Amino acid sequence: MFDVLKLDSHKSKDMENISQYIEHTILTANATHKDIENILREAQEYQFKGICVPPFWVKKARNGLGESDVQLVTVSGFPFGYNKTETKVFEIEEAIRDGADEVDIVWNLSAYNSEMSWVKQDIARCADVLHDHGKYLKVILETAYLTKEGIEAGCHICKDAGADFVKTSTGFAHEGAKVENIRIMRTALPSSVGIKAAGGIKDLETALAMIKAGADRIGTSSGVAIIQEARAL
């Protein structure tokens, strides 16, 4: 991982490295095959860390990426997370067969709010399936619906259940990633668990603020604009 301190220098060469934080994302309900083709082209042109696409488009995206180093990410239990574990596992297994490298699942906030222990078991089962295939799990907390204490507790649950990353948001709630929540997550999580900031990150300044607060990945549909802004400095 590159030195975040270099980002303060505003040198174009260093700023372009921000592409290795970005997961170029399209999870809109009306995404078309042309949108997927565009995101594939942009990911390779701008050397993004990854792309995040709907499950339906994973196979097409895998074919389009070929042997590229770009990580192929999709979602499970999206966007509300209250699917049964068996449903999430089925989605994950399908995603793996179609060529996904990582899966972002939405945790069961409904169960968490009901003080059910099932939340950790749900995540752990998904983690086991992915790890058995050498893939990575990110867990979306949807921080817009949580207090500081809830975010901390959620991070601890995700860590104990085997999550590789904890992610802030789906982008479908009333509020996305916030710098203060990234700081809470970074304090609550060990360095071995990454953080993905997502939701409402549309410009370079916001992306850099998230990284400085502790984010390891940036999920955004504005990846191209962010890189172009960085190159213009």
Image (cartoon, grey):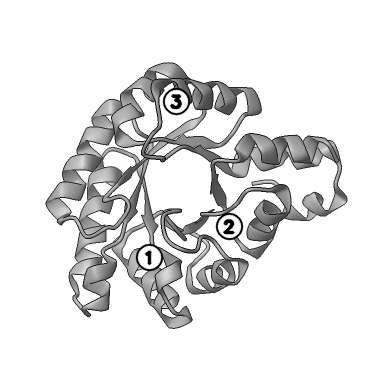
Residue bearing the label numbered 3: 36
> Percent x, y for residue 16?
74, 37
Task: Decide which of tag 3 and tag 2 comes sooner along the chain.
Answer: 3
Q: Secondary structure at mark 3?
A: helix
Dot 3 or dot 1: first in sequence order is 3
Reading the image, the residue beneath label 2 is: 215
User: Disc 2 residue type?
Assistant: Ala
Q: Which mark is residue 159?
A: 1
Number of the label disc, if any, that sits on residue 146: none
Contact? badges 3 and 1 (CB < 8 Å):
no
Q: Is residue 111 visible to the viewer in this orientation of the structure?
A: yes
The residue shown at (33%, 59%) is: 162
Corner quadrant of residue 231 = top right
Disc 3/disc 2 C-alpha distance (Å): 26 Å
Alpha carbons under labels 1 and 2: distance apart? 16 Å
Badge 2 element: loop
In the image, 56: left or right of 61? left
Residue at (60, 41) in percent of width and height? 222
Q: In this image, 63 relative to 123: left or right?
A: right
Q: Is residue 32 above or below residue 219?
A: above
Q: Secondary structure at mark 1?
A: helix
Asked whether the viewer can see residue 3, the reply is no
Whichever of callouts 1 and 2 sits on the residue coming sooner in the sequence is 1
